[in-house]
Amino acid sequence: MLIDLRIDEIAELRIDDSTIFMVWGERNDEGTLIIKSEMKHEN
């Protein structure tokens, strides 16, 4: 799966009915792109 991710946007991928995987990009002080992710469970 390919995700088109832009800076300051969050891509949300629904894994199943209660799990969302979020991916986003940020730039640090030196200008390096840092990709971050978080998995969230909904009840």
Image (spheres, rainbow, N blue to C red):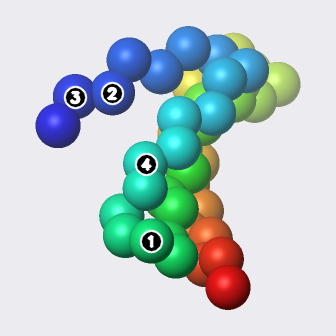
Residue type marked 3: Leu
Residue 19 higher or lower than 10, as above or below: below
Element on which disc 2 rests = loop
Between 5 and 36, the one nearer to me in the picture:
5
User: Secondary structure under badge 1?
Assistant: loop
Q: Is residue 19 visible?
A: yes
Q: Say which mark, if any, is on residue 17.
A: 1
| Camera sees residue 34 | no
Q: Quadrant of the N terminus?
A: top left
**Considering the image in quadrants, where does the C terminus appear?**
bottom right
Q: Say which mark, if any, is on residue 13.
A: 4
- The amino acid marked with disc number 2 is Ile
- Residue 39 vs 35, above or below: the answer is below
Instruction: Tell me the number on the disc at residue 3.
Output: 2
**What amino acid type is highlighted by mark number 4?**
Leu
36 over 41 or under it: above or below: above
Q: Are marks 3 and 2 in contact (CB under 8 Å)?
A: yes
